[in-house]
Amino acid sequence: MTAETTTVPTTSDSEAPYPRRWAAMIVLILAFMLDLVNVTIVNVGLPAIQRDFGASPTQLEWISAAYLLAFAAALITFARLGDLWGRKRVFLAGVAAFAAAGVWSGIAQGPTELIAARAVQGVAAAALAPQVMSSLYGMFHGRERATVFGVFGIVAGLAQAGGLVLGGVLITADIAGLGWRTIFLVTVPAAVVLVAAGAWLVPESRVAGGSRPRWLATGVLTAALVAIVFTLLEGRTYGWPAWIWLGLAAGIAAVVGLALAEHRRPERRAGALLPLDLLRRPVVASGLAVQLLAFAAFSGFLLVFVLWLQDGQGYSALDAGMAAIGFSAGGLAMAPFTGRLIVRFGRLVTLAGCLLSGAGALGVLAAAHAAPQSVGAWTLIPGLFVMGAGMNLVMPSLSTLFLNGVPSEHAGSASGIWNTSQQFGAALGVAGVGTVFFAGLDAGGHAMAFTASMLAVVAALLVSAALCLTLPARTGPQDA
């Protein structure tokens, strides 16, 4: 079957719009939902995977973290490949690879194989995700563009909640005796349909003279990010020996060294993975620090909360998924107000969101301690709702402050670094908060594990709130 290929330049708002742009938008957003669903659906399935494979706590963390880490490491490279080779071509390849990795995950015979399959699926997600955003940006202009990205935000919230519920439904239904394997296999038919629809509806676009991938720099960055996350995931297993801390120091040093090396040679500065001129800007440094901590807190919370409900409170996978919807519901309820609040209050919205989320996390913890035995789901909902509402104040406002504070010549690099830091922050959260949870589990059971991990989440959010004060109050481009 040969699909019609239409090239849509991403230059002027005055050009005639692509006639099938709304149908293409549906395909692109549904494909992006595969990634969003895939993150939360796995959290619900981790206890079942652990029982089936006899997986260690560290292996459970790797099953989540491998996907996020691979996504973070490969994102900028695939964004550049899309600009060079054609976004439609890379998008379709990414969706197809995502489906293949889903099959591999669903038939994996052990935790190590599943971790490898999840890493491959993370790379596939990194291939499709930047093409979605770039293609939507190129197809729509003016009010249409605002409408599309508004829809995009709502769908993201629904996908997060949908993954939690869908995972619970599939595991509880135990279709054909497959158990947890269906949480990986369920996305495969959808991906196949989206490849066919995308080949027909999504237009081709590329950037003339786009930056080529820098494979050596990408390899250094990947090794550095893996070294940092490896320390947090494996340190408890090995008893925190000196070489673990040396690995952490080496990972951080490699990131700093890469930025300095790219800056030292003027001919390498254009298209650098980590442009030092950009990273020196206060809005960039502060924004990345806030995002890393906040994203780590939210992703770590979603991991340990579902584990605690199922293993510590005896919830079924479905009940745990349904209870966690309260978190997503808070975010969806706040969504209509966030944009206006950002315009009026700027960085104070981000700060308030961090504090509100921290208060919600304490509310969840208080509800857990108030119950004499098993905790009822309804007693957890208020704290979850407040925490989710806070999250939806933090992320859109922080993104707006960050991207509006970057000069136009750095917009592409800033966007790539921003999205990479989101995924890396999520991986750090899984590793860090997960390690605190399992250390507490070894020391004093599920009550201590949940208390310690929730306090870690609150601490990260409080530090994020304090760092918000270093963000610029205004949202225009900042001076270096």
Image (cartoon, grey):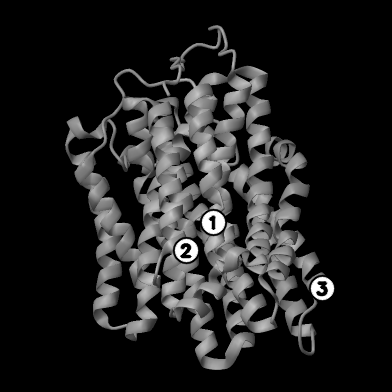
Q: Which residue is mark 2?
A: 64
Q: How packed is label 3: few (under 14 Cα within 10 Å), some, or many (20 or more)?
A: some
Q: Which mark is residue 379?
A: 3
**Callout 3–callout 2 Cβ contact below 8 Å:** no
| C-alpha span from label 3 to label 2 | 28 Å
- Residue 145, given in percent of the width and then of the height, sits at 62, 24
Q: Is residue 403 above or below residue 203?
A: below
The residue tagged 1 is 39
Residue type beneath disc 3: Thr
Q: Residue at x 63, y 22 (%)?
A: 22
Q: Residue furthest bottom?
A: 444
Mark nearer the viewer, 3 or 2 = 2
> Above or below — where is 130 with respect to 384?
above
The answer to whether marks 2 and 1 mark residues whose Cβ atoms lie closer than 8 Å is: yes
Q: Residue at x 60, y 48 (%)?
A: 395
Quadrant of image for the N terminus: top left
- Point out residue 279 in the picture as x, y percentages from the top left corner: 37, 43
Above/below status of 27 relative to 177: above
